[in-house]
Image: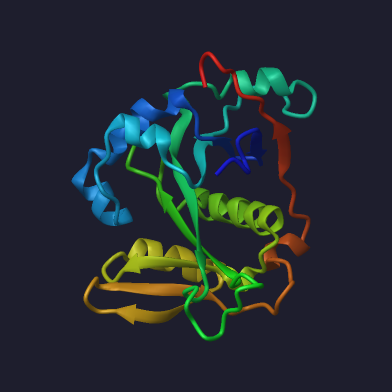
């Protein structure tokens, strides 16, 4: 998905950069872990397959305190977050039709509305301390951008989480998601957003919420 291929999102603690070729080796290292694949219900892929993946993805970077201002010097700011040393994890979105095309509720002339499945992965590292708000801030930043860029209301978003993954369940509950359909065969629960009506903003966007959005053109030789 090319929607975010030239967009970087910045707030006071994290930097979300579009997935580039120079991210792939570290990402491949993360996904070589059986624990990470199980936590994200992912299959092991080759590096070539990871480069070809089509989904809305940002790589989470820890914001460097020595980086220049993103507003005054965006080129220098991006350069300070252009290698794997600040990589924390990734956050993804997959689009699904809300009902199959053959459903009697869908019309050939009007495609079904979409649902947006969200995933976040932050593996253990020296850079990341759990329960410090980084994962929550990442999701809030990502959900705000995705909702606006894809013109989807909050009620379109959901996540699938393993029954035993208390950390992820608590993360989404903390944002206002509630548990919905349970799939016993996969031992997964679907968490959904029911807190706002159609067309409403996310609640955190109403109280001085600020994210800097930078143009992040692709370097064809490196990216």
Looking at this view, is 55 or 91 the one in front?
Answer: 55
Q: Is residue 158 above or below residue 92?
A: below
| Residue 126, visible in the rendered structure | no
- Residue positioned 57% across, 32% down in the render: 63
**Number of numbered callouts drawn:** 0
Q: Nearer the viewer, residue 11 or 47?
A: 47
Question: Can you see residue 197?
Answer: yes
Residue at the (70%, 19%) spot, across then down: 75
Q: Residue at x 27, y 48 (%)?
A: 36
Q: Does residue 193 sit above or below 9 in this rendering?
A: below
Residue at the image point whose x is 33% and y is 54% from the top? 40
Instruction: Specify how the rendered protein is coloured.
Output: rainbow
- Residue at the bottom extreme? 104
Is 73 or 126 nearer to us in this picture? 73
Left or right of 113, for residue 169: left
Farthest front residue?
A: 108
Q: Quadrant of the N terminus?
A: top right
Q: Position of residue 171 (x, y in %)?
A: 46, 63
Q: Residue 216: horizontal and vertical position, in percent?
A: 66, 28
Say which of 74 and 154 sits in front.
154
**Residue 67 coordinates in the image, percent (x, y):** 64, 22
Q: Quadrant of residue 213?
A: top right
Residue 51 drawn above or below residue 109: above
How far across and how far down the image is residue 211, in percent?
Answer: 71, 45
The image quarter in which residue 163 lies: bottom left
């Amino acid at each position: 998905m090319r929607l975010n291929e030239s967009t970087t999102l910045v707030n006071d603690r994290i930097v979300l950069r579009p997935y580039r070729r120079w991210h792939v080796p570290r990402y491949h290292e993360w996904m070589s872990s059986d624990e990470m694949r199980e936590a994200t219900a992912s299959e092991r892929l080759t590096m070539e397959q990871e480069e070809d993946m089509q989904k809305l993805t940002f790589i989470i970077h820890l914001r460097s305190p020595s980086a220049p201002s993103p507003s005054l010097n965006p080129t220098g700011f991006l350069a300070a977050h252009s290698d794997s040393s600040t990589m924390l994890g990734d956050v993804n979105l997959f689009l699904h039709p809300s009902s199959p095309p053959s459903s009697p509720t869908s019309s050939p002339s009007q495609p079904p509305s979409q649902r947006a499945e969200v995933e976040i992965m932050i593996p253990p590292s020296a850079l990341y301390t759990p329960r410090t708000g980084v994962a929550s801030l990442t999701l809030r930043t990502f959900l705000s951008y995705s909702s606006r860029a894809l013109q989807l209301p909050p009620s379109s978003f959901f996540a699938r989480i393993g029954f035993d993954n208390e950390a992820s369940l608590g993360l989404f509950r903390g944002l206002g998601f509630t548990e919905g359909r349970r799939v016993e065969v996969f031992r997964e629960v679907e968490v959904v957003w029911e807190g706002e009506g159609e067309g409403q903003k996310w609640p955190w966007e109403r109280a001085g919420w600020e994210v800097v959005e930078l143009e992040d053109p692709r370097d064809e030789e490196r990216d």
